[in-house]
Amino acid sequence: MLDMKAISKVYQTDMVQTHALRDFNLHVAEGEFVAVTGPSGSGKTTFLNIAGMLEPFSGGQYCLDGVDIGKLNDNARADLRNQKIGFIFQGFNLIPDLNLYENVEVPLRYRGIKSGERKRRVEECLELVGLAGRAKHLPQQLSGGQQQRVAIARALAGRPRFLLADEPTGNLDSLMARQVMELLEQINREGATIVMVTHDPELARRAPRNIQIVDGRVTDFTLYQGRSVDTMMTAGG
Amino acid sequence: MFTHYIDLAWRSLRQTPMVTFLMILAIAIGIGVTMTTLSVYHMMSMDPIPQKSNRLFAVQMQTMDEGETWQTEDNIPYQLTYPDAINLQALPGDFARAAMIRSGFSVHLNTPSSKPFIENARVTGRDFFSMFDLTFIHGGAWTEAQSRSAAPVVVIDEEMAQQLFGKTDVVGESLFLGERRQEIVGVTQKWRPTIKFYDLNNGSFGKAERLFVPFSHVKAYDVDTWGNTNAWKFEETRDFNDKMNSEMVWIQFWVQLDTPAQRQAYGDMLMAYMQAQQKLGRFNREELSYGLQDVNAWMNYNDVISEDNKILVGLSFMFLAVCVANILGLLLAKFMRRAADVGVRRALGASKRQVFYQHLVEVGLLGLLGGSLGVLFAQLGLLGVRQSYDYYESLANMDWVMLLSAPAIAISACILAGLYPAWLVCRTTPATHLKVQ
Amino acid sequence: MFELKPTINALMRSKLGAVLLILQLAITLAIVSNAVSIIQDRMTYLNKNTGYPEDDIFKFNSLNFDKQSDLLQQVELDEQKLRGITGVIDAVAISSVPLSGSGSSGGMQLKPEPQESKRSNMGYVTGDEHVLSTLGVSVSEGRDFTEADVVVIDDSDARPSVVIVSRALSDALFGAGKGLGETIYWGADPLSIIGIVETMANQWPKSSFGEKMAIIPMLRVGNFQKYLVRTAPGERAQVMRQIEELMLSGHRDRVISDITGLDQKKARYDAKDVLMMRMLITLIVVLVIVTALGIFGLSTFNISKRTKQIGTRRALGARKSAIVRYFVVENALICAMGLMLGTAAAVLLGQQLMQWYSVPALGYSFIAITAGLLLMMSLLSVLMPALRAANISPSIATRSV
C-alpha cells in the first residue's frame, strides 16, 4: 500500500538546513494498522504530511498504492488524496461555517459525486459514528469527542483504502479516546489500511504494528510485538 | 487610563499595518470627497453679513398685469422699474434705503501715462455704505445734496486707490469715468463678500465692485445697467429715456428695517403706494403683492446654491456611507480576530466597559488619522474645483468651521462604524477563547 | 461543481460581513449609475454641434468714451479695418455673442403684439449683412442679407423687415421644414423670414430654447460695442494679438477689452457643467476604488481567518482551482445580491433626483452596464486573495493551533 524508499525531507531556512527525515524507509501492506510513535520533534508530523501528500519531499521515492507520488502534479495529488486517503486530524479541523452534514459532504463534492449518492453516503457515515440525529448542528455546538467522530465520518465518507490519523485522541478524554479507537479498529477490520500517529503508548499498544521515528529515521517494532512497550520506549529513548 | 487606551490603540493599528492603511485610506477618501463638496456648499450657504442679515430686506413689487408670470416661485419680478425705485427712494421715514444697478465705466486719469481700463461700478444711494457695513478709511459717502444735484463724485476702495494713485488717501483727487471728471469723496476698506448677496441676479459669486457712483447719475448721465433688464410686455423703447419710463424691471432696491414694527410699517407703506399707483392706471391686477425678504431668505429665493452642488453633497454623503460600511467590515474582521486576546484581557479582569472603550478609542484614533488625511485630500479637491471653474475661486475654500468639521465628521463616522464591532468584542466571554487555544 | 448551497449556507451564517458588502455594492451601484447618467447627459450637451467654427472666431468689446465722435461712422471704420487684416475672413459689429451666456432674448410670434398667438422663445443678435459670414454659417434655404436689408436705428422710424432664423425656430413656429417666406412678429414689428440656417445655437445653448436663434439686420450703435471676427484656420492667435493696438490706433478714447475666442467663451459658459462632470467622475473613480479595496480587504481577512479551513479542504482533496472557485463564487453571490438591491436603490435615487432636480431620467441600460462593470471589478478584487488562498499548503491541516 505505502512504500517509502530513502525518503528525505530538508527544511531550508536562511541560516540552517534541518533534516526532518533522512533515509526514511517504510513499507505498509494493505490492511495493516500501524501506530507511529516518537518523541516530539522526531519527524512524526513530517512523515504524516509526506505520507498524505500534504507536503513535497526532498529526496527518495514514495509509491502509494503503486503510484509514484514524485511524478504527480498538484492537481493529481489532490485527486489522489481525495480518492485514496482519509484524514483524521488532531484538531478535528471541521469547517466552522458548515454544519455536520455539509462537513462530511466536503470530500464527496470534490470527487464530483452526484447529490443522491452523496446524501446516502453522508447519512451512512454519520450513522456509523452515531451522530445521524445531529446533521444540522454546527461543529461548535458539539463536544470534542463528537467533533472527532464527525471528522472520522468525513474521513470515511470517501471510502478511502488508506486512513491517516494524526493524534486522533489527542484532544479527548480517556473514555472518548477509547470510543474513537474502537471505531478505528472496526474500520481496520473492514479492510482499510490505517497509519496512526500518536504519543499515547497505551493507544499504540492496541495497534498490531508499532513503529517509532527517532531523529528522522524509522525503527520498526513489529518484531517486538508482545513485549512491554514501556521497556521498549526506554530502550529506544 | 485614556492615554493607556491610546497607546493600546496605536499598537493595535501598527499590528495590522495593511488593514489600518486601508481603513485610513477609506475614511480619508470619504472625508476628502465629502468635504470638497460640503465646503463649496458651506461657502454658498453662509450668511454673508451675519450681524444684520435679518434687518436688510430686498424689495420686490408685483408690477405685472393680471395673468402674467415670472420665473420666481411667487411670480414677482426680482427687480423694480425705474419710476418705482425713484418713488420708493422718496418715501418718508427714518430708515436706510438704496436703489442700485450694476454698471461700468472706462476709468482713467486723463494723463498720457494712464491707460484707460474697464471697471465695474455700483450705482447706488449714499445709504449703501452704512447698510452693508462698508468702512471708510478716508472721507465718506457723498452728501444728500450732492446726490440730489447728481454732483460728479465717486467713492472707490483702497485697492483701486492704490492702483490709480499709489496711495489710499486720495480724497479730493479726481478720476475720469469716460470723459467725465469725478471727484473722489471717500475711500473704503477693501470689501469682498464671498457671495454678492446684494446683487443676485447678475451672478451670485461675482466680485463686489470697487467703484461707487450716486444713483442720481442714472438719469443725469444716462448710466444704463450692465446687469439684466427684463420686460414682461412689449413696449417701444427707442432711447434710454423710454427705458426709464417703461415697465421694464432693472433696478435693485434694499432697505434696512431694524424692528418688526418698522417692517410692518414699511409693508403698509408699500401697499399704500401700490394702491395709489393703481389709481394712476398701473398694477392692473386683483391682488397687490410685494416681496420683503431678508438676506438669507433672499439668497434662498434666488437659488444661490446650485442644483449641481446639492446633488453632489447628497452623493458625497452616500459615498461616505459606503466608506463607513467598508470600515465597519474591516473593523469587524480585525476585532473578531483579536477576540482571543480580549478573552485573555477579560480573564485578567478587564471589565466589559473597559474593553468597549478601548476599542472605541482605537476607532476614534483611526477617524482622527483618516480625517486629517481627508483634509489634505479635500484641499486637493478644492484646488481642482478652483482650477476647473475660476468663478468659484473664493468659494472653493475651507474655512475653520470646515477644517474642524472634517476630523469631527471622520471621528463620528468611525465611531459609528466601530460601535457594533466593539460591542461584539466586549461581549466575548473570557472562557470560550481561552478554551479553544 | 460550484458548492452553491453550502456556500450560501456559510454566507448566511456569517451574515454581517456579507451584509456590509451587499450594502456597499448596492449604494455604489445607485451612485455610479445615476452619476454616469448625469455625466452622459452633460457630455451629450457639451459635444453638441453649435453650428459655428468656434476655433476660428473671437470677440472683443470696445467701450468708447469720446462723446464727440460719430459712433456709427466709427463702427463702420472699425469693421473695415478688421476686415482688412490679413488672415481675417470677415468681421462684424454685433449686439451680443452666441454661446456666451449673455445677450438678448425674447419671443417671436405669429401675430403682432398685443394679439395672442403662437409664440416661441429665442435668442437674437443684430448686426449688418456680415453676421452670417462672420459666424461661419450659411443659409440652407432662402438667401443671406444684403446691404439693403440692414436698418440703422436712429431718430428715423425705420424698422427691420426681414430675419434669418435657425431651423429649430422656424420648425417650432411653422412645423418641420416650413417657415421660409412666412412673416413672424417681433413685438409689433413684422419680419419676413428670408433664410433658414440648419444649426445655429443662440447665446444660451444650455437653455430649453438654446437652438432657437434669430438674426436681425439692424445696427444700433452705442458707446459699448461688441465685435466678432472670423479668421482663416490657424490665424486667430496672431490676429487676436494685434487687435488692441490696431483698434486704439487712430482712436485712443476707448477701451478694448475681453478679446476672447468663441471656444473660450463657450468653455466659460460651460465651466459649471464641466466642473460637475469632473466632480462626478472623480466621485465614481474613488468610489469604485474604495469599494474594490473593501472587497479586497474583507476577502483577505476572510481568507486569513479561514487558513486552517482552506488547508483542511486541500487535504481532503480540493484542487487549487476549487479553492479559487469557492471564494469567487462566494463573492459573486454577495455581488449578485448587492447588485439586485442596488438596482432598486438606483431606480429610487434616480426618481428622487428627477423629482427635485433637472436631471434626465435614469436609463435602465446605465444600471445594467454599471452592474456588469461592478461585478467584474468585484471579481477582480477577490481574485488576488483567492489565488493566494489556493497556495496555502495543505500541511496547515496537521499543524496544531
Image: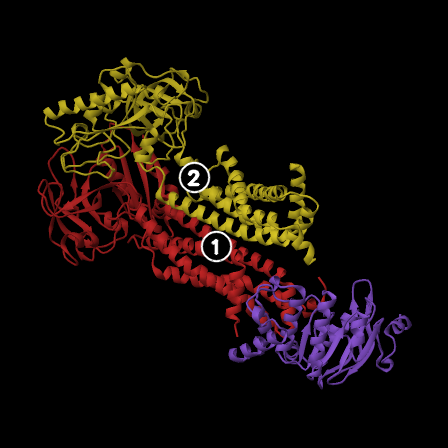
Q: Nearer the viewer, residue B116 or B424?
A: B424
Determine the residue positioned at 52% across, 35% down.
B404
Residue B289: give x, y in percent of width and height: 19, 29
- The outermost residue toward the front is A175
Residue B304 shown left or right of residue C177 in the figure: right
Q: Nearer the viewer, residue C296 or B52?
A: C296
The amino acid type, in three-letter code, at marker 2 is Val
Q: Nearer the viewer, residue B400 or C324?
A: C324
Residue C296 shown left or right of residue C231 in the figure: right
How far is disc 1 from disc 2 in space, using C-alphas? 26 Å
- Look at the image and give the colour of chain A: purple
- Residue tagged by mark 2? B40
Which chain has been coloured red in this picture? C
Q: Quadrant of the C terminus of chain A?
A: bottom right
Parent chain of label 2: B
The amino acid type, in three-letter code, at marker 1 is Gln
Residue B176 shown left or right of residue B16 in the figure: left
As helix, strand or loop, the secondary structure at mark 2 comes to helix
- Residue tagged by mark 1? C24
Residue C190: give x, y in percent of width and height: 10, 45
Above or below residue C270? Residue A42 is: below
- Look at the image and give the colour of chain B: yellow
**Residue A201 seen by the camera:** yes
Residue C168: give x, y in percent of width and height: 21, 53
Parent chain of label 1: C
**Residue C254 seen by the camera:** no
Could you say which disc has been placed on residue C6 in the image?
none
Q: Callout 1 environment at 10 Å: few (<14), some (14 to 19), or many (20+)? A: many
Occupied quadrant, residue B100: top left
Q: Callout 2 environment at 10 Å: few (<14), some (14 to 19), or many (20+)? A: many
Determine the residue positioned at 56% across, 44% down.
B370
